[in-house]
Image (spheres, rainbow, N blue to C red):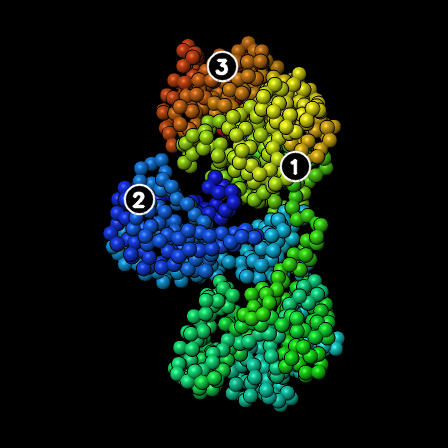
Amino acid sequence: MKIIDLRTMRGPSYWSVKHYKLIVMKVDLEDFADQWSNAVPELADRLTELLPEIGKPHASFETQKHAVKHPPLTKEQLADGEPLGHVIQHVALELQRQAGMPVFWGKSYPAREDGIEFVVFSYQEERAGRRAAEAAVEIVEALCNGKEVDLKPLIDELHEIREEEFIGPSTWSIVSEAASRNIPYIQLKNSGIIQLGYGVNQKRIWATTTSYTSHAGVEIAGNKNRTKAMLHDAGVLVPKGTTVYSEDGLRDAIEDLGFPLVTKPLDGNHGKGVTIRIMNWEDAVEGLVMAQAYSRAVIVEQFIEGFDFRLLVVNGKLVAAAKRTPAAVVGDGQRTIQELIDKVNEDPRRGFGHEKVLTSIKADKHTLDILKGRELTLESVLPDGETLYLKSTANISTGGTATDVTDLMHPYNVLLAERVAGIVGLDICGIDLMTTDIAVPLNETRGAVIEVNAAPGFRMHISPTDGLPRNVAEPVVDMLFPRGTNARIPIIAITGTNGKTTTTRLIAHMVTTKGYKVGFTTTDGIYIQGRQLQKGDCTGGQSAEFVLKDPTINYAVLETARGGMLRSGLGFHTCDIAVVTNVAADHLGMRDIHTVEEMAAVKGVLPRTVRKNGWAVLNADDNLVYAMREKLDCRVALFSMDENNPRILDHVEAGGVAAVYEEGYVTIYKNSYKLRIDRAAEFPITFGGRATFNIENSLATALTGYLAGFEREDIKLALRTFVPSASKTPGRMNVFNFPKFEVIVDYAHNTHGIEKFAEFLNATEATRKIGMVSGLGDRRDEDTLGFARIAGRIFDEVILRQDRDLRGKTAEQLKEIMERGLRLDHAELPINYIENELEAVDYVLANAPEGAVVVLFTENIAAVLKKLEEFEAEHGLARI
């Protein structure tokens, strides 16, 4: 077995609009091509023995209200016969589940090629999902070949990846709460920082610090002496203590404070380097050494008797309190301490790192030191009923437990916590205090505030061992996005085979004229407020995220191409308006999309992401685009070049909204009313009405503006002031009017595109029509022939060139196909072959006759435009 292709989807995609995070794998089954699971002896027995959970039903809460059940892969099913691709899919999911990543959705199906399967399944952490994909193929192949498989190293590896990549339960609780309110999120690259919201409305969190967290507050909390001093001055009870740097300082501190004592690093956190209940000099020295592993300065303070409580304050209000208990075992007079630890770790709530509610207890050096101090080892047997604490601190991350006590808090202690958070200056504040009873005022129990924490963990509150779970993420999101505020910015997304770049630029121009700060993406770059920040084809998910992460923009217009959707999915989960211009034969045979219908399914992903009350703007003249409305859960608006199109008439009669080209006007239809925007010939982009394809693009733009709430005059102004040029629309109908001839630079590169261009050229008068064309190596031969055939019909003379990247074919192959297509309907067509594109441009400029129209279908847009501008300058020409 061999993996041919492995892709990671990070947003809605061809394979699923609902399930964003998917691994898409193409597997060559080689020797197993004709075999199902029942054709492999003992596969059913061996697989279910290796992964017994694979045959049990699973349930996941995939919606807000309902648990979704996922079918298992049972021994009986394997024995009856399952495709090996389906087996690989289930193994990949089960491997992730065993490593603490609850993923469930998947599918598999045969590819067009014999013996090759598509395997699609969900993942939680990308690296883990990709590793599970590779491992699933290796495991199934090994089992089919009768080889032994050791799962433990693999599961350990996946566990480690999860711990490295997972953003943590505290952060995840905030993200989940935000997502439940339809607030989008983006994890910023190479960091644990999460952006909530888009554009100017974004806020950020890092663990449980936020955009509102005070740097000064974090600095104060990080210096325990400074914190104690500030709290003491404000009348808050704190332990008496001092800071030491050496054993001499430690001896002086003990003389002043007496035993019992606590030692901890000055700048420590999460209980690291802390030793409590020190009763003698030897333990004090050991505590000093442990603390200095984290900080040269060590706090020595009185040990306060009582229980360990954590109070959580968010935005000035106490929201949760928990009693924390260090990791412990209780003796039974029979088992060793190690056996007792193993028994405790059998609790299904305990797991590796942060994967579950509780963390498994590990007998680390700290534990062994505690045992040594009590003259015990891991092989010692505890008396029945005796409790042994295995850690000196009660952190959940070291195996401790938590009991919710929020409702037991005395009002004095509630006020105390809220005062402490305000004194230190933290929007999210964890307060550790010791007291014998949280229901009694602290000043009556001789308790004290031990520590104040910035970025406190939420796990003990959202999933306590005992007591009521508290949604402590809710007040955090309330603080960041008060009810009624908007976390999103409007998103208009555009797709289609042809016209999407021009339509994107038209819409972006229209939105800009309304005064919005726009970010938009196109095939030639990313633009933020009119400035190009990146060059190249920027129509994929990463480019969309680039715009949505920009903190200066309040509107996004995103060109969305086939390539990005197939490579990694969309860069957003929902949009407000989706425009689909058309679907035609282009790029077929690439990335396993072989038919126009399959291409329509790819393009159809975009309108399916429109929010429920948003709009899908569809071309009613295109059968495949019109059919997309059947799968949509949003409102639909249509546009058409034919005012009598029955689809338009039926749609409008049913109360729908549409845009049509009627009597030379771009007109909005709603019910029985017409709103004429303007004569299409008045829009520079239509070249006096000759460029019918840009009338279509204007229809889509006008309709989008109307649905976005723009006034007629705003739409009209935008369409009248959008002047195509080499700077504004590079490679899209760039016209150079030289004194003797006209040059048009365009990017038409498929049959549908050149057919539309032909309508424009046929309506253009010229003494001679000359075209510079090329074939594309990543197109099917029939597509290249179709493109060349149209070119042969519309030009009186052709200069045939080659692209720099031949994309899999040779220059000779492309030359032969193009020449054959050019002469299918024009046998005597003059063809001049000049391989280099810029040399071909030079030839055209030197030899074009007076009155000619020269069309340059270019690949290297920037270089060709530069050459034309240089030609102007060299000949002292002024652009008309």
Q: Residue at x 37, y 28 (%)?
A: 810
What is the three-letter code of the residue carrying label 3?
Phe
What is the three-letter code of the residue carrying label 1?
Gly
**Relative to 739, is 12 on the left or the right?**
left
What is the three-letter code of the residue carrying label 2?
Leu
Q: Residue at x 70, y 39 (%)?
A: 516
Identify residue for label 3.
795
Task: Assign a secondary structure to mark 2.
Answer: loop
Do the CB atoms of the residues marked 1 and 2 lie less than 8 Å apart? no
Q: Earlier in the sequence, mark 3 or mark 2?
A: 2
The number of discs equals: 3
Identify residue for label 1.
530
- Mark 1–mark 2 distance (CA, rounded to whole Å): 50 Å
Residue 736 location (% of width, % of height): 60, 20
Residue 714 location (% of width, % of height): 73, 30
Identify residue for label 2.
29
Residue 825 location (% of width, % of height): 43, 12
Pick whichever, 615 or 809, lies toward us: 615
- Mark 3–mark 2 distance (CA, rounded to whole Å): 49 Å
Residue 488 location (% of width, % of height): 65, 46
548 in relation to 465, above or below: above
Task: Assign a secondary structure to mark 3.
Answer: loop
